[in-house]
Image: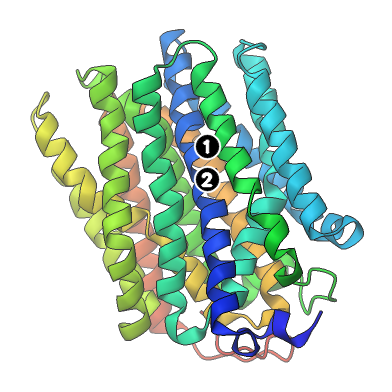
Amino acid sequence: MSESRSNPAAIGATTRWLALAALILHMGAIGMAFGILVPLTALLLEQRGLASSAIGFVSAMPSLGIVIAMPLAPRLVARFGVIPMVLSGLSISLVSVLLMPVADHPVLWALLRLVAGMAMAVPWLLGETWINALATEARRGQIMALYGMAFFGGMAVGPLVLQAAGTEGWLPFLLAASGILIAAAPLPFIGHLAPNLRAKQAMGLIGALVAAPTVFGTALMGGISESALYTLLPVYGVRSGMSEGEALQLLTWLLVGAIVLQYPMGMLSDLIGRRLILILLALLAVVCCLAILALPTGNTLSHYILMVPLGGCLLAFYALGLALLGQRFLPVQLAVANATFILTYELGSLSGPVLAGLAMDLGHPGGLLGFIAAVCGIFASIALWRGRVRRPVVDKDFPGGPQA
């Protein structure tokens, strides 16, 4: 790997920003595909009368696929190359999406979603590692916020596209497939700037977890809350008396909050510290969830209003966690650290819909928001406790700084 590909300061500003723009487009298009597929799957299964826990199980299959494939991803890239593996992963995902209308059965959908998740492991890993490697420390929070805005912007467009196209027939699946095609388009032009996953890594997955537990706690909490809300919020809306269109708009307003507030949160994290911002956001999310639970049934407008700050809080966790990751780990450690971050996030995504679905089955629709409030409260408590008791530790294998 050339020096320019490992050190962002050695890359020309124009080249760096063009590469970042291409990667942000790539991830935004993937976000649009997710934004269509996740609620589409949940709503179609809801129409078939499945329990919330069963819907959550099928929806969690992509996360399981990523958990299975992610430890293998660096080795596969080292053997076959970055761009071939990314395009292969996108191609397999594309085929899986197009097979869903043909294989119209919950069990087959679960298998197809599992395969799609495994295929997306490499594009996801490379996209985020790439962006973090190109970011400069002074603006890392802002750059990761721009990435988050693009990804969640794509996810916000997804429900609107689904609302316009409807949930029946091939059209919504074809529109999701178009997002995958758009994601592939810019990658061949920036392949020479890809992060070097052939380099010998200075640590393993467990070593990364030990080095920075708060970073990966952020990923776990973000995965649980985001996947639970994005999968089951439309179901919550329908069971609370909203129409299908009104329930889908809950997701849109949640993502509006994420898009509007993402960049201010990134700027604040660069100025006053990423750990403090994460704790404050978790506490504010608890307040928002409790306020929504206190609303009378049928108060749709108030639901929409409160979804904005809730989305701004919860959906900022992933980008801020990535910024904390880039701050904590050296460039040579980023590939394994980012893989560990995604694995931890996906473990949360895998369990989030299932646990939240059980909470809804036990506590009716409000069980979803009660579950999210509990997760956020636990995270804030643990992060505050670690902030009081942790000591700076510099390990010879992790010379990047103290534990996060």
Vertical position of residue 307 compared to residue 196: above or below: above
In the image shown, does 329 or 77 lie closer to the viewer?
77
- Disc 1 residue type (three-letter): Ala
**Whole-percent x and y of residue 331?**
67, 81
Quarter the N terminus occupies: bottom right
- Please, is residue 348 above or below residue 280 in the view? above
Residue furthest to the right? 79
Residue 271 vertical position relative to residue 163 in the rendered view, above or below: below
Q: Toward which corner of the image does residue 197 lie, by quadrant?
A: bottom right
The circle drawn on residue 133 is none
> Residue at position x 73%, y 91% from top?
396
Distance of label 1 from label 2 (alpha carbons): 6 Å
Image spot of residue 15 (x, y percent)? 60, 76
* Three-letter code, disc 2: Ala
Residue 217 visible to an observer of this rendering: yes
Please state which of residues 50 and 8 is positioned toward the viewer in this rendering. 8
The image position of residue 75, as x and y in percent, is 86, 59
Q: Residue at x 39, y 57 (%)?
A: 149
Within 10 angstroms of label 1, few (less than 14), some, or many (20 or more) residues? many
Q: Residue at position x 27%, y 61% from top?
A: 261
Query: Disc 2 designates what residue?
Result: 29
Q: Secondary structure at mark 1?
A: helix
Residue 33: mark:
1
Residue 146, x across and y down, in percent: 42, 64
- Residues at discs 1 and 2 in contact (Cβ within 8 Å): yes
